[in-house]
Image: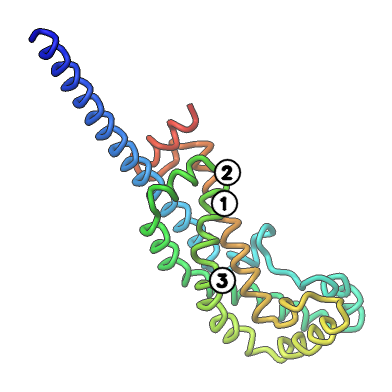
Amino acid sequence: MKLSRLVCSALLVCTASLAQAGLLDAFSDKDAAGGMREALSQGAEQAVKLLGKEDGFLGNPKVRIELPGKLQQAESALRMMGQGQRIDELKTSMNRAAEQAVPEARTLLVAAVKQMSVQDVKNVLSGGDDAATQYFREKTSAQLSTRFLPIVSKVTGRLQVAQQYNQIAGQASSFGLLKAEDASVEQYVTKKALDGLYLMIAEQEREIRQNPAQAAGSLAKKVFGALGN
């Protein structure tokens, strides 16, 4: 009888311990997910804010859009041939187009944050310095490209030099001097705008990981602070 009571007591203690552990695990997952969403939202918002304004691209050497490949190498020769003003107009137009397109990213980036599963959160927390950025790229790049393209086309389409770019780039591509994806100024700028956006998100992510005190929310500080310990 005493043995039966002892076994029952032991089972009750074990059951209670397992239940408590389960609750703690669930609470930990909830905290991790909440902290990650806070941090990602902050990083995405800041990246969009930095880039989606005048000179956000043009004034930032890290993301400034230059002529692609062989055309960039030929820039000096083109300037010597009196094409300097047109080149400047094209480069300014490309960067202005990216600056106008980037604010379109905010809604999709926020949606990607909200859709994160617990496993997504764990993958990001255990990943490298840009794991969250890679998550964003995977979840949003196709849709953002679709949203960016018409805005970029509207801005660059105002310049005759953009049409000339497409003609020259198309010929260069046919000879293997330029990647096919860079043969259209609209496609090229859209791709570079996305690259710049994800680069800035990655920078924001690294800052938060390295200095959790800068994180906007208490959960983000808690989660990333724990990772740093």
Secondary-structure class at tag 3: helix
Image quadrant assignment for residue 190: bottom right
For the residues bearing labels 2 and 3, Cβ distance under 8 angstroms: no
Q: Are marks 3 and 1 in contact (CB under 8 Å)?
A: no
Rounded to the nearest angstrom, the CA distance separating label 3 from label 1 is 18 Å
Residue type indicated by callout 3: Glu
The tag earlier along the polypeptide, 3 or 1, is 3
- State if disc 1 and disc 2 touch (CB < 8 Å): yes
Determine whether, in the image, residue 142 is placed left or right of residue 214: right
- Disc 3 crowd rating (10 Å Cα; few below 14, some 14-19, many 20+) is many
How far apart marks 2 and 3 lie (CA) works out to 26 Å
Q: Nearer the viewer, mark 2 or mark 1?
A: 2
What is the C-alpha distance between the residues marked 2 and 1?
8 Å
Return the x and y of residue 104 as percentages of the image width and height: 47, 72
- Write the residue at 47% across / 33% down: 227
* Viewer-closest of 19 and 11: 11
Residue holding disc 2: 129
Q: Label 1, on which residue?
A: 202
Residue identified by numbered label 3: 99
Say above or below: 30 vs 165. above
Going by the numbered disc 1, the residue's amino acid type is Ala
Q: Amino acid at mark 2?
A: Asp
Residue at x 65% of width, y 67% of height: 58
